[in-house]
Image (cartoon, grey):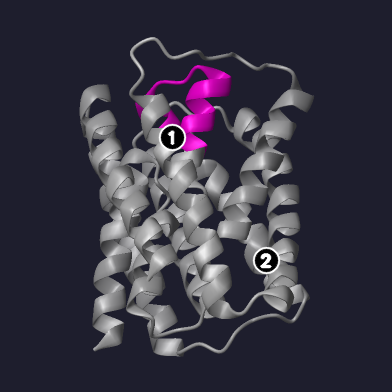
Amino acid sequence: MYDLIYSLIIFFATFLGAFVGLGGGVIIKPLLDLIGHDSIATVNFISAFAVFSMSISSTIKHIKAKTKIDFKFIITLSIGSVAGGIAGSRLFDYMLTIFDNTDLKRIQGIILGILLIISVIYINLKKRKSFHVKNPIGIIVVGLSLGLTASFLGVGGGPINVAFLVLFFSMSMKDSAVYSVGVIFFSQISKLITTAVTNSIPEFNYLTLILAVATAVIGGILGARMNKKSNEKTIKTVFTIVVACVAGVNLCNAVI
């Protein structure tokens, strides 16, 4: 029963993740936390694997569709993101030694909820301030902050990535969605490698993980296709509605 529920959530999350740049983890983690069937470490692990799988299938779909992608920019941003991802994973493991599973879940929920609300407000400002960072060091620093935040919160970074890409690189929502998924690929692979190397892989059900990967791949392909067909206004509207709802779920998780 839980495998079916998890699969539906992951498909829905990764479809939206590839469609508007949410990644998927930002939806997967709070909903699985709300269900409460697995520990926070297991939920983070399943979420990371699902989002990683989505990022691969989505990027391949965009390449086949000949979407214009600056891979040099993605790699530069991801250098910082990978370093931040490793630091974020270490920070998460350290926090688990200080707080119990329930308290850490609440802390994550509050931080993520606040960041999501800020992201929605910023994206919808009519006269929002934005920059166009071109210096490689500056790009790496932005990636570092993204990777640290995403890895610690276990969400892949999606909506925060989108907001940062719009803020620091003056990208459109449509382009931000594509580049967000590209950055997520590197941040999640670093998280998974760090988890394996530090021997901190949690207990998990193999069938659950296999179904998570399969549904994430399908969600990523369909989401990338929808992104290609949609305009800026549609992507912005879907982003706003979904992120506002997810912010609410995270804040609920923090107080329940």
Q: Amino acid at mark 1?
A: Ser
Residue placed most toward the observer, 111 or 234: 111
Q: Marks 2 and 1: CB-CB under 8 Å?
A: no
**Drawn side of residue 53 relative to residue 142, left or right:** left
Query: Up-down: is 66 above or below 55?
Result: above
- In the image, which residues are magenta? 161-177
Q: Secondary structure at mark 2?
A: helix
Q: Secondary structure at mark 1?
A: helix
Placement of the N terminus among the 4 image quadrants: bottom left
**Drawn side of residue 128 relative to residue 12, left or right:** right
- Point out which mark residue 161 bears: none
Q: Quadrant of residue 191?
A: bottom right
Q: Quadrant of residue 36?
A: bottom left
Which residue is painted at 39% across and 46% down in the image? 22
Residue 236 in picture, x, y percent from top left: 28, 30
Q: Amino acid at mark 2?
A: Phe
The alpha-carbon separation of the residues under discs 2 and 1 comes to 23 Å
Could you tell which of marks 2 and 1 lies nearer the N-terminus? 2
Residue 225 in picture, x, y percent from top left: 26, 42
Which residue is painted at 44% across and 64% down in the image? 254
Q: Which residue is mark 2?
A: 92
Which residue is painted at 75% across and 64% down in the image? 90
Which residue is painted at 36% across and 18% down in the image? 125
Query: Up-down: is 209 above or below 1?
Result: above
Residue placed most toward the observer, 91 or 70: 91
Residue placed most toward the observer, 11 or 89: 89
